[in-house]
Image (cartoon, helix red, strand yellow):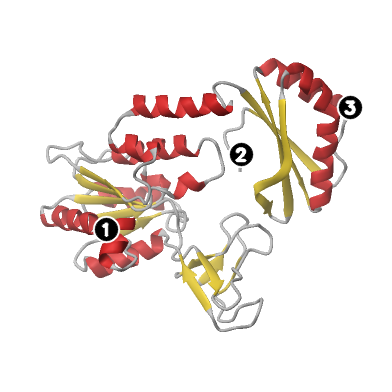
Amino acid sequence: MREERRETKRNVLLSRSLERAVRESLESGGQVLLFLNRRGFHVFCRCMECGAALRCPNCDITLTYHKKPGVLSCHYCGHREPVASRCPECGAFALSYAGTGTERVEDALAALFPGARIRRMDADTTTRRNSHGEILGAFRRGETDILVGTQMIAKGLDYPNITVVGVLDADLSLVVPDFRSFERTFQLLAQVAGRTGRGESGGRVIIQTSRPDLPAVRFAAAHDYESFARSELEQRMKFGYPPYSRLCRLLARSASASSARDFLASARALLAQRAASLGVALLGPVPAPLSRIEGKYRYHMLMKSPGQRELLELTDLMRLQLRPPGDVTLAVDMNPVSLL
């Protein structure tokens, strides 16, 4: 996509090759599946004068613009507010919307392919009872030409008339601050690619990415799981992450940032000596990547151990000798799936 932008001198949603493939599929009576794991119309809004972004008052996250019903929304706590015309920080009439979600893709497709029957499937279009089944049913019966959606269309669909699958931004999950981000990206790309090629007409998968060199993208495009696993396992071994270690995450939440941080600092001080003798590394406490959700500040500490037994001993020690204060909630996540 870097080359695409350089050659076309514009920031396109669909590359020329994907647009051509979609057009050819529609002309031959095939169906198209387009995947973007981000809903809404624009992903964030910021002031071009002072640089401030419009953020949720309850969460450490930018607000997403939804064209229908015309609101700015937080995808974590559900906070909504009217679309702003002035910057709340400096008062300038210089707000700019950027980033692409499935709602914007749906609009762009309608302009590119005016005769096509287009449906969108994400958390915004499946709120009504049976809406999920209704959208998929229409697609199965051939009443929809192009289905654009988020992760809920990535797996489980077995429709032989899908001749083109497009992944619009394969890099999204690669920038998540989690050691499993490459693994999740490979899994998602492999799943969505498997939605086509199931009928006699065969199928094509086009992955749009700015980093085609990365193993998660390169090996997914080649359907090469074994090479990806070898590459990923080398990195896991190098930095001591599962399956070459066991992890335990301590997550403290509080309306006071200092209370959450100080409690985990006390936990670290309590466990440090015994952890060192067991060969367990203590990382943190630091703010979690999503440092505030629903008005609660979030700090976490990671314990990295050669085995499970050592982690259980340390969590038992903490449970017996240290209780969180009343304004702090502690979550002990053994072998966490996500570090967000």
Q: Badge 2 is on which residue?
A: 339
Q: Badge 1 is on which residue?
A: 15
- Numbered disc 2: secondary structure: loop
Mark 2 or mark 3: whose residue is earlier in sequence = 3
- Numbered disc 1: secondary structure: loop
Q: Is residue 307 above or below residue 69?
A: above
Mark 1 or mark 2: whose residue is earlier in sequence = 1
Work out whether residue 55 or residue 272 is closer to the camera in this orientation and state it: 272
Q: Quadrant of the N terminus?
A: bottom left
The percent coordinates of residue 308 (x first, y second) are 66, 18
The answer to which image quadrant residue 13 occupies is bottom left
180 sits left or right of 150 in the view? right
Q: Which labelled disc corresponds to residue 321?
A: 3
Task: Identify residue type, mark 1.
Answer: Ser
The percent coordinates of residue 225 (x first, y second) are 35, 28
Report if the CB atoms under discs 1 and 2 are less than 8 Å apart: no
Identified at 38% across, 47% down, the residue is 211
3D distance between C-alphas at marks 1 and 3: 59 Å
Mark 1 or mark 3: whose residue is earlier in sequence = 1
Identified at 83% across, 23% down, the residue is 273
